[in-house]
Amino acid sequence: MKDPILRLGCFLTGRNYKIVKSCSEASTKSVKKFLAAILIMSIIWGFIGFTFTQRYIQGSMTASVIVAAIMVFVVIHIERQIILSIGKNKWSSWFRIVIGVVMAIIGSVIIDQILFKQDVEKKKISDIQEEVYDILPLKTNQINLDIANLDTLIINKEREKAQIVDEITIKPFVKSSTRSTIHHNVMLSGKDTLIARSDVTIVDIPNPKASFIPQIETLIKSLQAQKSLKEEARLTMREDLEKDLMSKTGFLDELTTLFSILFSSLVALLVWIALFIFFLALELFVLTNKYGDKGDDYDETIIHQMNIHRLRLAKLEEASVIEVKN
């Protein structure tokens, strides 16, 4: 393949390779210049998309690569809006400047979060300690209340068990009666008559309340197990709370931490300003190259082709009018 760099440049910028080859060296250099700017922007924004997905969205390697590819795709097509425009469009320029400022802010902030990762982590630890001091008393009071309620339930159940045991000790057996009906044939007034007789038998049986004791003991053991879990949670509550807060990496939380670092450190603020200017210059690089130069013969060729096509259309329209009149 001849001149692969030029072919790649035409592919990414959207310019027609055949027309570029028929133009002067100025058009070829212009394509390669745009290609360099697009590649730089694509690499940087691909890296930003990949890192952002892995760190904050917790995406897999495949998801991170897909997001990076989408970012590169977006960057290329944003730059094409400027590269492929014919002439100087002020509205398009201002729109690209606005996009450039927004993207420069986003890019510099994300890169700062990567550069200042250790400082952000240190500040997060300090902020988490303060958050733990605020949350811990509330959680401790709640778990103490739960333990107190469990203690109350355990005491009540043990008291209920003790009452049943005392009652069984005093009355291990209770009276129970059974009734049975017996039929007899007797002669009454010379007739054979069936007479029913009910017999009541009173016996001693074990106190039925004794069956409640195993159920109460099982419930007491369950309440005691819950109490033990609550007490263990109370002992490790601070450590668990710190781990829970540290395990959650929120973009807005880290952004807030980053800005607190920037506004408290002049050096950090100067680094962010430098990165912002760098990103803004990159974002507007294609725009300045497009409208800062005098242009090349590629645009003139496109305009020439457009004028010829318009002239042909005008002549066809005139011919159609004459044909209709005739």
Image (spheres, rainbow, N blue to C red):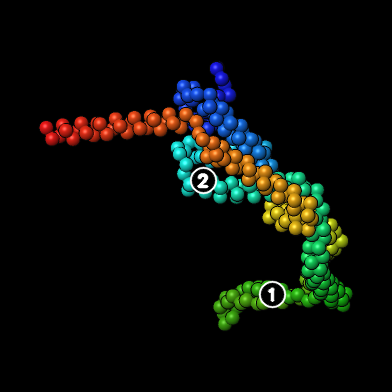
Q: Which mark is residue 93?
A: 2
Residue 15 percent location from the top left of the image: 49, 30
Locate residue 122, reporting x and y percent.
82, 53
Marks 2 and 1: CB-CB under 8 Å? Answer: no
- The residue located at (57%, 79%) in the rendering is 190
Residue bearing the label numbered 1 = 179
Under tag 1, what secondary structure?
strand
Instruction: Tell me which residue sits at (77%, 48%) in the image.
Output: 116
Quadrant where the image shows the C terminus: top left
Tell me the kind of residue under disc 1. Answer: Arg
| Amino acid of disc 2 | Ser
122 to 162, vertically: above or below: above
Q: Which of 4 and 249 is in front in this view?
A: 4
The numbered dot on residue 224 is none
Left or right, 252 with respect to 121, comes to: left
SS for dot 2: helix
